[in-house]
Image (tube, grey):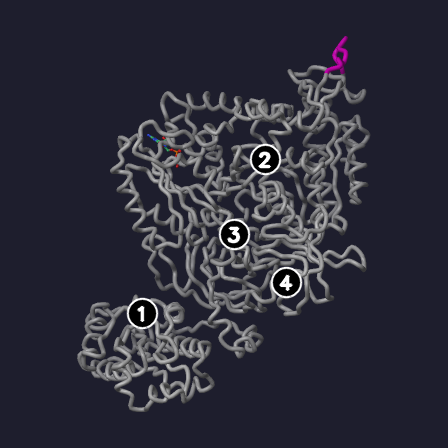
Amino acid sequence: MKHAEGIDRYGIEGYLERYGDKGLLRFITCGSVDDGKSTLIGRLLHDSENVFDDHLRALTKDSEKHGTTGEGIDFALLVDGLAAEREQGITIDVAYRYFATERRKFIIADCPGHEQYTRNMATGASTCDLAVLMIDARLGVLDQTRRHAFICSLLGIRHIIVAINKMDLVDWSEDRFMEIRQQFSAFAAKLQVPDVHFIPLSALMGENVVNRSAHMEWYQGSPLLDHLETVHVASDRNLIDLRLAVQQVVRPDLNFRGFAGSIASGIVRVGDSVVALPSGQRSTVKSIVTWEGELEEAFAPMAVTLTLADEIDVSRGDVIAAVNNAPRMATNLEAMMVWMGEDALEIGKRYLAKVGSSTVQAVVREVRYRANVHSLHRESSDALTLNEIGRVALELVRPVTVDSYNKNRGMGSMILIDRESNSTVACGMIVDRVTAETSTSRRRDAGDARSNVRAQRSKVPAAARAQRLGQAPFILWFTGLPRSGKSSIAYALEEVLFKEGHLAHVLDGENLRLGLNRDLGFSAEDRWENQRRVAELARIQQDTGVITLTALVSPLAADRAEVRRILGDRAAMVFCDAALEVCESRDEEGLYRRARAKEIRNVTGIDAPYERPTHADLTLDTAAESIVANVERVMVFLRQRGWIGDGAKA
Amino acid sequence: MTDYLLSHLKQLEAESIHIIREVAAEFHNPVMLYSIGKDSGVMLRLAQKAFYPGKIPFPLLHVNTTFKFREMIEFRDRVAKEAGADLIEFINPVGADRVSVTPWTHGTQEYTRIMKTEALKKALGDGGYDAAFGGARRDEEKSRAKERVFSFRDRHHQWDPKNQRPELWNLYNTRVKPGESIRVFPLSNWTELDIWLYIWKEDVPVVPLYLAKERPVVERNGALIMVDDDRLPLDDGQKPEMKSVRFRTLGCYPLTGAVESEADTLPKVVEEMLRATESERQGRVIDFDEAGSMEEKKREGYF
Ligand SMILES: Nc1nc2c(ncn2[C@@H]2O[C@H](COP(=O)(O)OP(=O)(O)O)[C@@H](O)[C@H]2O)c(=O)[nH]1
């Protein structure tokens, strides 16, 4: 083995000092059955000299008996110890393998690519920094490949190595490699994976796994192992936002009171100002205590014990965070969930949510949509079943401290537990809703009231109501500068639809501000709250079977994205596009004039931004075209969508 | 420290401490199964670290078969005392007289079942523990690769392979109903080499049997067995020979094979291991007997 050379050179202690303790990389391997995943892992272990002779001898013997590779050693047998267990119905979601080189220790999360791949992959990926995604060079990018990539991206994996395997069976063709590479890149552009790397290899023959291939001189990059040893994952960690979820209060005697927990993110230093949540009480870090002695600073993912300068209330489940950069407290959460339970998600049922070190009762209020893992499209659904992925809205009985998963894995992840069976039925990645949560203090005050709310189910299905009205309801969300024509077009459209036998209703921003939204101003927060309420109202109307047309400026892209999520998928964004000068010239009420004169503030276009939509479903030129023409264009659009006209369906 | 990187051992350490704290916080009555071996030693050290400056808030449980090496028992008592931990020793009453249940009266398998598996179940049942830490690692055997960190056991201490919970991130589902329990393996992600490195770097005490020394041994079924007391029946005319040996794993002395070795310091042991071309488990007689039967034993309630 390689160790021997090193020991000969440096002596054992010198060798251990040099190579003993090193970096760690956790990666997941994904691929469909027969892509060569096991062969690849076996190869990695063998070629990096991590296999003992007795195992190799056993392997050679087994290969003669069971191997699928003819003459040679079947490296897949090195890791395929689980076939028998599968037959016995033993649930294997992930098998973990370990190996090390002089540069890194590796933990492989090896997920069986069978039926339960979604659940298995989510489990395996949850602790990984990188994914090796196998593609059979003969088959190219398959549905399955896209699914795997999607799940990796959902679980926050930032590095994907696309291992294009079985190159020996495509004559080591560079063209084929490039073709697959392009296919995959086109798709991956839609995912949030910043680092995608491609390696052509043959697991079977060990080419470009550990050793450079002799058959693919056109490939300039390094073999897989080199890449695994050097890929830079350190900067993926969040060292900005200090958060420590308190696991235990350590109190050996009256003089010592320490808060033990793992640092989920950030760096903590003695003297730092910190806040304990949910109490909101502040103090400073007095000491960072470890068995080895006190530290001046500590960072993620260290497990430490903090003492604070003041006697403040802190107990298990609380989070200690930086004062000027605290996470949010929320009773309402939005999360992408992977359903893992045999029983489907039930809206309104009480589950337990474990978030950090707190466990809280939680109700799923709504399934916003289900993500179709084949097409990546969003579908409406009111449940999630085993292995389905969707975005859900959760309500907790008391607030928990969270960040979005994107920003902070440790503070943005959760599991759901069934209270009767105690099984883990789902995992969730919390989605950022900062705008919504911090919008108004009124929301926070309302937290207690909400905690007693239970989702109730109507006995009359929405579809039945729509049917009685003889239509398939939808929502059109008009956005644009003040005076760009939103209201005029919406009201004109309402009339046309009505005459054609539909029941539509306009929710006009300005009108609503006279009643429902009377308490809101024009700050960014209030604007969001305004939109949120209208969006929720639109959904209510949708459930009553009524078509909704809204007319709100809705100037910010992020807010509109949030609105879209609330509205669901039978909704379209219509952009009323007119230049500011045009809108100003239509200024009958003197809105712009007063803004220009600084008599009023926060007028969109003047001293508040309007972010032009780049992905509107329909853009209307409201400067050049008449209202009637634009209404007609909307009608055409609606027919194209199949939302009105013959055979319109929900 | 300026690059804010943790070495792999420190990462493993942090992960294990997190697990140990989680168990202490969420279970009513946890216990740590302390087998005196090197893995147990590391686990104990991690527990000390987890609660420092407080004491370990749960007892250590040693299931004694009465055939443990004497040095192990001495070591156990000393270490537990130094750690300030409560130590509970359990011996299955049927074999407590040290001569009624032995590998040669009952056969290895039956002896192991009575003095280890049954004893463990009884000890856990009597103690009413809802969580028990074990020092097993996933790299020990192929079939362990899929093992959970939190391994759920029904009220008969049985492992139901179809009813294990998915484990994500470091969010462990610790819910159990009365009578049910969870075996927790905080060293799951450690390899044998990690254990040795850690022992070396952190100066974790280990039983001297791991280091080579002249010891009296006899040969049995191709294995070198140390004559640790006068209960080991010797063949006619057989005489213990003094050989420089050490042990790769520690268990019951009649069932644990020694390896001939000159490695009398920790680094030398690691060196032998790194130069080794054969795997670790070869020394264990019990595994020879029943290759691949780990799974079965686990289902019965032994780890
Ligand atoms: N020709 C060729 N065959 C391969 C290669 N990698 C794997 N295979 C074969 O593909 C089949 C499936 O491999 P296996 O590793 O069991 O796939 P898994 O189901 O993804 O683990 C086996 O017959 C392998 O020998 C490769 O690079 N080239």
Q: Chain of mark 2?
A: B
| Three-letter amino acid code at the position of disc 3 | Arg
> What is the crowding at mark 2: few (fewer than 14 residues within 10 Å), some, or many (at least 20)?
some
* First along the sequence among labels 3 and 4: 3
Q: Nearer the viewer, residue A333 or A305?
A: A305
Q: Tell me, yes or no, if residue B185 can be seen here.
A: no
Q: How far, Cα to Cα, is label 1 from label 4?
A: 40 Å
Q: Position of residue B110 (x, y in %)?
A: 68, 28
Q: Which residue is mark 3?
A: A237
| Three-letter amino acid code at the position of disc 4 | Asp
The answer to the question of whether label 3 and label 4 lie on touching residues, with beta carbons closer than 8 A, is no
> What is the crowding at mark 3: few (fewer than 14 residues within 10 Å), some, or many (at least 20)?
some
Q: Element at badge 3?
A: loop
Give the numbered dot on residue A613: 1
Give the numbered dot on residue A318: 4
> What is the crowding at mark 4: few (fewer than 14 residues within 10 Å), some, or many (at least 20)?
many
Q: Compared to B242, does A96 lie above or below?
A: below
Q: Position of residue B254 (x, y in %)?
A: 72, 23
Q: Is residue B129 magenta?
A: no
The reply to whether label 3 and label 4 mark residues of one chain is: yes
Q: How far, Cα to Cα, is label 1 from label 2?
A: 53 Å
> What is the crowding at mark 1: few (fewer than 14 residues within 10 Å), some, or many (at least 20)?
some
Q: Which residue is mark 2?
A: B191
| Residue drawn at the location 62% of the way across and 53% of the way down | A262
| Residue drawn at the location 68% of the way across and 55% of the way down | A260
